[in-house]
Image: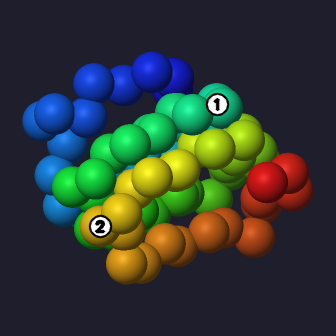
């Protein structure tokens, strides 16, 4: 995931179990995100993936995550 248009992305984000990584700046500037659930199986979150997500209050990270 990279370069999303976050205009329509509000509230809680639950990623699908098929996701294995979140690319650099994947959710950059998604101000309306309040929580993110990263599923088991995701091994990498790229640089600045959630930068400037000013509304983000809660993040679940799985044990499978090895690179942040």
Tell me the tag on residue 34: none
Q: CA distance from mark 2 to mark 1?
A: 20 Å
Find residue 23 and name its label: 1
| Residue 7 located left or right of residue 49 | left
Q: Nearer the viewer, residue 29 or 36?
A: 29
Left or right position of 67 against 40: right
Mark 2: secondary structure: loop
Query: Extreme bottom residue here?
Result: 57
In x, y percent, where is residue 63? 75, 70
The residue lying at 32 percent from left, 45 percent from top is 30
Residue with the mark numbered 2: 55
The quarter holding residue 62 reads bottom right
Q: In this rendering, would 65 be left or right of 33?
A: right
Image quadrant containing the C terminus = bottom right
Q: State which quadrant residue 36 falls in.
A: bottom left
Choose top left, top right, bottom left or bottom right for residue 4. top left
Q: Position of residue 35 (x, y in %)?
A: 34, 68
Residue at position x 45%, y 52% in the image: 52
How packed mark 2 is, by other alpha carbons closer than 10 Å (few <14, some 14-19, many 20 or more), is some
Q: Is residue 20 visible?
A: no
Residue drawn where x is 58% and y is 43% of the image: 49
Taking depth in this image into account, of 64 and 9 the one nearest to the observer is 9
Is residue 59 left or right of 31 when viewed as pictured? right
Label 1 environment density (alpha carbons within 10 Å; few <14, some 14–19, many ≥20): some
Image height check: is 4 above or below 57?
Answer: above
* Residue at 40 percent of width and 56 percent of height: 53
Return the residue nearer the eye: 7 or 66: 7
């Amino acid at each position: 995931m990279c370069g999303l248009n976050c205009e329509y992305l509000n509230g809680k984000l639950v990623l699908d179990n098929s996701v294995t990584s979140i690319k650099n700046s994947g959710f950059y500037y998604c101000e309306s995100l309040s929580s993110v659930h990263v599923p088991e199986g995701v091994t990498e979150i790229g640089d600045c993936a959630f930068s400037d997500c000013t509304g983000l209050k809660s993040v679940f990270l799985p044990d499978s995550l090895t690179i942040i």
